[in-house]
Image (cartoon, grey):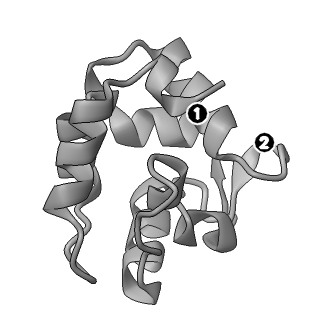
Amino acid sequence: MSITDVLSADDIAAALQECQDPDTFEPQKFFQTSGLSKMSANQVKDVFRFIDNDQSGYLDEEELKFFLQKFESGARELTESETKSLMAAADNDGDGKIGAEEFQEMVHS
């Protein structure tokens, strides 16, 4: 699966443009611009599986660091503060990782 199978390359490019500078990544803005927030719950979970590098069923901080690169290989890494902020926004049960349900809830919040 390629991310552009489910999201428009132009929308992804626009979303990445908005957060190209360090510490400018805003999850909700990214989800809206990329089109992710308009997708069904099942489609969002498909994207989650694409982002989940080790297919563990969870995203940890190391995987989140490379979040933008899953949308475009040349994109920057998230900063430590952006990674922690993204984790805090989605990790509803406080286990230090984001499951598919938590990710989908964050995208649609």
Q: In the shown orientation, is residue 52 left or right of residue 22?
A: right
Which amino acid lies under the numbered mark 2 shown in the image of this protein? Gly
Q: Position of residue 46 (x, y in %)?
A: 61, 23
Q: Position of residue 93 (x, y in %)?
A: 60, 55
Quadrant position of residue 86: bottom left
List the single residue furthest toward the front: 74
Residue 99, image x, y percentages: 66, 44
Q: Residue at x 47, y 75 (%)?
A: 77
Q: Is residue 25 visible?
A: yes
Residue 28, position as x, y percentages in the image? 23, 48
Q: Quadrant of the C terminus?
A: top left
Q: Residue at the location (46% across, 78% down)?
A: 84
Q: Secondary structure at mark 1?
A: helix
Q: Nearer the viewer, mark 1 or mark 2?
A: 2
Figure quadrant of the N terminus:
top right
Q: Is residue 93 left or right of residue 12?
A: right
Q: Which residue is mark 2?
A: 57
Q: Amino acid at mark 1?
A: Glu
Left/right placement of residue 12 relative to residue 64 reads: left
Give the residue at x 39% y 60%: 89
Question: Pointer 1: residues within 10 angstroms few (<14), some, or many (20+)?
Answer: some
Q: Who is closer to the viewer here, 41 or 55?
A: 55
Horizontal side, residue 92 vs residue 94: left or right: left
User: Which residue is tagged 1?
Assistant: 101
**SS state under label 2:** loop
The correct choice, above or below, for 33 with respect to 44 in the image is below
